[in-house]
Image (cartoon, coloured by chain):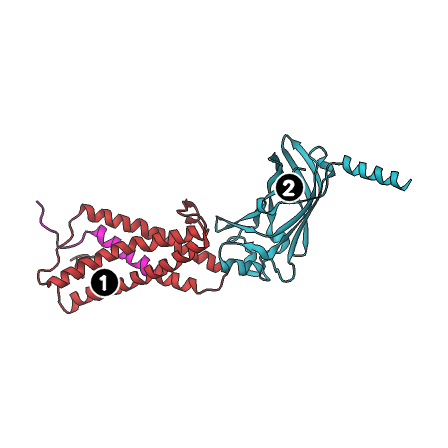
Chain colours: A cyan, B red
Amino acid sequence: MKSIFLAATLALAALSSAAQQKIIPAQSSIRFVTTQMNVPVEGAFHRFDATVSFDPKHPEATKAEFEVELGSIDLGTDEGDHEAKGKAWLNVAAFPKARFVASSVKSLGGDRYEASGALAIKGATQNVLAPFTLKEANGVRVVEGQFAVKRLQYKIGEGAWAATDTVADEVLVRFKFALPAK
Amino acid sequence: MTPAPTRYTPTAIALHWIVAALIIFNLCFGLYTVGLPLSPTKLRYFSFHKWIGVTILGLASARLLWRAFHPVPALPASMKAWELKAAHVSHALLYILFFAAPLTGWLFSSAAGFQTVYLGLIPIPDLLHKNKEVAEVLRITHHWVDYALAAVIVVHAAAALKHHFIDRDDVLVRMLPRPKPKSP
C-alpha cells in the first residue's frame, strides 16, 4: 500500500515537468541603469541565486525565488561601490540581500511572458511586473527581461541623495537567467 | 602682400581671454571637485567640469582654425634666438595641452562609464568601453596633463609680464583689448 502511494507520488512529480532548478550563474546577469544628470550609468550585481520551477506550458504554476547579494554591486569605481553599499543607499550591513518572489507568470503570447511578484529591498516591499522573453537553445533556457524600480520607494538614496535632479528616481533593472532546459 | 599685423584681431583677442578664463577656472574647479566627498554636488560639479572642458575643446579648435587663416604679429626683433625658440616651444606645448587636457578627460570619463552629455542635452559619444584599469590610467594621465598645462600657463603669463615690464615691448599689449578712443 505504502509503495503504491509512493509510486503515485513519484509519477505525479514526473508529470509536472517543472522541477525546481538552479540558474547557471556564468550565463546569467543582473544589470541596472541609473540616470545621473541625464546620463545613463550602468552597473551590475555579480552574486545572486535563484530557485525556479517554470514550465512554459503552465506559466501560471511558476514558482521562483531570486536572492541578490547587494554587497556584490559593481558601479565601475571603488568610490561608487563604497558609497552604494553605505547607509544612505543600500545599507548592505543591515540589509545584505534583495529578494524577489514571483507569485505568478502569465503568457503574453509567443515567447513573451510577464512575471509579477514582490520585490523586497532595504526593508521595503513593492509589487513588480517584469516582462521577459524565453528562448531555448542547446539545452539552455534563457529568460531575459527588464523592469523599472522607483528607488525612493525603497529609500535607496536618502538625505541629499533623495533629490532626483542628480540621480533620477527610476532605475532600470535588466536581468538574464539561464536555466537547464531539462 | 599684406604687411604683418602689429596687433591680434579682436576675434583672436576675445578667444584668447575667454579660453584663458575657462581653462584657469576649470583647472581650479576640477582640482577642488576631486577633493569633495561623494555627494550630489560632486556629481553636478563633475558634469559642469566636463561641459566646460568640451567648451574649451571647441574654442581651442576655433583658435587653431583662426591661426591657420591669419598671420600672427611678428615677435620683437630684439628677442634672442633662445627666447624665440622658447616662445615657439611653449606656444606649441600650450596648443597640444589645450587638446590633451579635455581629450584625456573625455577618455577617462568614457572608460569610467560616465558618458559626457554636453549641457545635459547633447550626448558625446564614448570613445572607450567601460574598463576600471584603463580608467585608472587615464585618470592619472588627465591629472598630469592638467598639471603640465597649469605649469606652461604660468610660464606663458610670466613671459608676457617680462615682455611688458622688463623688455618694455608690445607683446602683452597687442593681445589686450584696445581701449575705446575717448569721445571729444
Occupied quadrant, residue B180: bottom left
Q: What residue is drawn where x is 62% and y is 45%?
A: A24
Residue at label 1?
A: B156
Considering the numbered disc 1 on the image, is that residue within a helix, a strand or a loop?
helix
x, y percentage for residue B154?
26, 65
Q: What residue is drawn where x is 42% and y is 54%?
A: B134
CA gap, disc 2 and disc 1:
65 Å
Q: Which residues are magenta?
A: B1-25
Q: Quadrant of the C terminus of chain B?
A: bottom left
Q: Judge whether residue B26 is colored magenta.
A: no
Residue B179 appears anywhere in the view: no
x, y percentage for residue A181?
65, 37
Q: What residue is drawn where x is 14% and y is 54%?
A: B73
What residue type is disc 2 on? Leu
> Mark 1, residues whose alpha carbon is within 10 Å: few (<14), some, or many (≥20)?
some
Q: Quadrant of the N terminus of chain B?
A: top left
Q: Which chain does tag 2 point to?
A: A
Residue A103 is labelled as none
Which residue is most to the front?
A: A3
Q: Is residue A12 left or right of residue A57?
A: right
Q: What residue is drawn where x is 30% and y is 62%?
A: B148
Residue at label 2?
A: A179
Considering the numbered disc 2 on the image, is that residue within a helix, a strand or a loop?
strand
Q: Which chain does tag 1 point to?
A: B
Q: Judge whether residue B6 is colored magenta.
A: yes
Occupied quadrant, residue A16: top right
